[in-house]
Amino acid sequence: MLNALEVVTIVVVGVMVGVEFSVAFVMNRILDALPEDSSQLGHAHGGRMLGALMPVWYIGSLVLVGVWAVAGWHHDGTGLVVTAGALLILSVVMSLLLLVPINNRNKTWTPENRPEDWKQQLDRWGRLHYVRVAVIMTAFACLAASLT
């Protein structure tokens, strides 16, 4: 049973990392290359779409890691699982305090109502997102390493 939990957790966290990596290094670059109005509308739509999905994914991943840590408490590698859980908690806290407020503003913007500093706000979100991606990639690496 523990093996199945480990596999499911690694797949769920790994796919989440892949999505966030893709947002940082693929989607944002594509959107930024579009003309201004299209770029801003694309960022707003992405913010609405992923803003609805990612909280469930982050919390679900954290729950899976927590269950794994408890279920495998006396197994080798549990320290890495706990470290991964702490990193996922950090990513949720970062999201709530730093990224979500920017995203909540961004997802309501249109070319008619966006603030003059909209690009600077999205750039700040992007820089913070790079840090979050590094945090969740490290959590994923801890999970994978805990299996050895």
Image (cartoon, grey):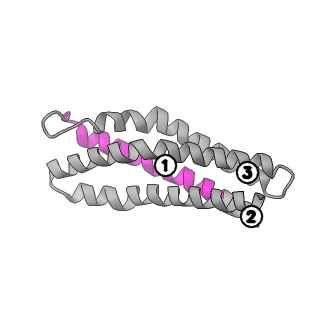
Is 144 magenta? The answer is no
Label 2: which secondary element: loop
- The Cα atoms of the two marked residues, 1 and 2, are separated by 25 Å
Q: 80 above or below 110? A: below
Question: Within 10 angstroms of label 3, few (less than 14), some, or many (20 or more) residues?
Answer: many
Q: Is residue 51 visible?
A: yes
Instruction: Give the residue type that dot 2 points to.
Output: Leu
Q: Are there few (<14), some (14-19), or many (20+) residues within 10 Å of tag 2?
A: some
At 34% across and 34% down in the image, what residue appears? 104
Assign a secondary structure to mark 1.
Answer: helix
Residue furthest to the right:
74
26 to 82, vertically: above or below: below
Question: Mark 3 highlights which residue?
Answer: 68
In the rendered structure, find residue 19 and report the number of the disc placed on it: none
Q: Nearer the viewer, mark 2 or mark 3?
A: 3
Residue found 77% across the figure and 59% down from its top? 1
Front label number (1 vs 2):
2
Q: Secondary structure at mark 3?
A: helix
Residue under label 2, please give it: 147
Please tell me which residue is depicted at 60% across the width and 40% down the height of the picture.
Answer: 89
Residue kind at label 1, given as amino acid type: Val
- Magenta-drawn stretch contains 131: yes
Q: Give percent across and percent down for residue 113.
A: 16, 33
Q: Earlier in the sequence, mark 2 or mark 3?
A: 3
Residues 130 and 140: in front is 140
Name the amino acid, label 3.
Trp
Give the percent coordinates (x, y) of residue 139: 62, 53
Query: Could one spot residue 128 in this view of the protein?
Result: no
Residue at 36% over, 42% down = 124
Residue 43 appears left or right of 6: left
The residue where tag 1 is placed is: 131
